[in-house]
Image: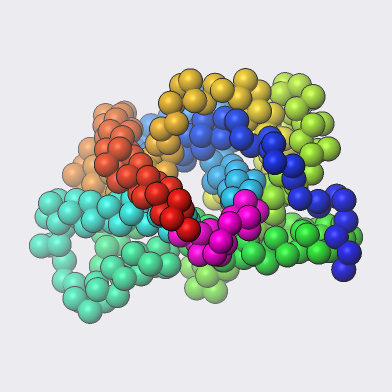
Amino acid sequence: MIQIPYFKKRNKVSFNNHNNFDLVRLFAALQVAVCHSAGHFEYQNFAITILGYFPGVPIFFFVSGFLIYSSYEKSKEIQKPLFNFYQKRFLRLYPALWFCFLLSIISVWQSGYFDSVKWDSGKFLAWCLAQASFFQFYNLDFLRGYGVGVLNGSLWTIAVELQFYILTPFLYFLLTRSNKTVVFSLVFVLILINVLNSQLNDRDNILMKLFYVSFLPWIYMFILGALVYKNEVVLKFIKKTSFLIFLSLYLLSYFLVKDYGWGNAINPISYILLACMIIKFAFTAPNLSDSILNRNDLSYGIYIFHMPIVNYLIYLNINGGLGFFICLISTITISFISWFLIEKKSLSFKNNALRKI
């Protein structure tokens, strides 16, 4: 099919060269960590309630679509584009993930839980391989008595993100070779799948669990990020529109369809408005993120480390406000350690490797 102007390749000077996406991801990670911790420690206040109106996981999926598609498009301009693209994704995710898994196992062992239950070494090894590879949503039965019953329930999104990465070359082909009718028809079908998923609440059904951790209920969020990246007209419209307009419309749509579903479900209209808010903030005062964070990105660490800490504290019967604040302080501290000792070094290795390609 003929490539059409709507999905044309972006100019060298791109909107995402200077942005606040690091701050957006930090907000999303803190939203997940704070709301998970507040729920499990049974600690609530007005600020936490407000924070719950802006779900972090859907924010991550949109930002991922915008930035990952951008990264893949840029990788096409150098040698070994697929190798380069997947190497970057691997080095960003797995070193810190393996460190998190190691600390999680140490925390369970140190708590004394392993001494209190019978466990199968073969199943434990299989679970370790699953956690270190592609199946982080798998949980052992003998861990059900530890903490909240799932060692690190937040990691289900890692498997979903990996599926997004696998599908990115196909998405690139779709957006550069298909017309608008094909693309938006596909997005419409995927939105319907998301709506269906939001209404299916049978968490005990294994097929529903597998469907929930597949790309199908969530990929329209990722594709929306890629579509916004590709369309400079939409980007310019969002930049010219007041953030307060998007916020007001978002809250209105959110409360009108408040009982949309469970977990990370958010109705598609609210999600589109949330995406507009993300873009508006990301490109307003675009040097704000660098000024505050100095290119340090704690978001991934906060996201992956908070639940092992929640589980450890709950198993030790540290609850309420005390558990909540200890958890947040510990999470941020370990995230700093992870960033400076593991993640930043991995990114440095990635950049050095790219210079040799």
From what the image shows, is residue 13 above or below residue 4?
Answer: above
Residue drawn at 18 percent across, 44 percent down: 316
Residue drawn at 81 percent across, 52 percent down: 7
Residue drawn at 51 percent across, 37 percent down: 25
Relative depth, front residue between 106 and 144: 106
Q: Image quarter for residue 215?
A: bottom right
The verdict on residue 78 being magenta is yes
| Left or right, 18 with reference to 5 | left
Q: Where is residue 163 shown, x and y percent of the image?
A: 55, 64
| Left or right, 336 with reference to 163 | left
Q: In the displayed image of the protein, which residue is found farthest to the front?
A: 356
| Left or right, 286 with reference to 101 | right
Q: Where is residue 214 shown, x and y percent of the image?
A: 56, 66
Relative depth, front residue between 302 and 196: 302
Residue drawn at 54 percent across, 50 percent down: 263
The verdict on residue 13 being magenta is no
Where the N terminus falls, by quadrant?
Answer: bottom right
Magenta residues span: 73-87
Q: Where is residue 293 shown, x and y percent of the image?
A: 44, 26
Q: Where is residue 115 shown, x and y percent of the image?
A: 10, 62
What secondary structure do most residues of the magenta stretch adopt?
Answer: helix
From what the image shows, is residue 344 above or below residue 201?
Answer: above
Badge count: 0
Asked whether residue 233 is in view, the answer is: yes
Asked whether residue 33 is in view, the answer is: no
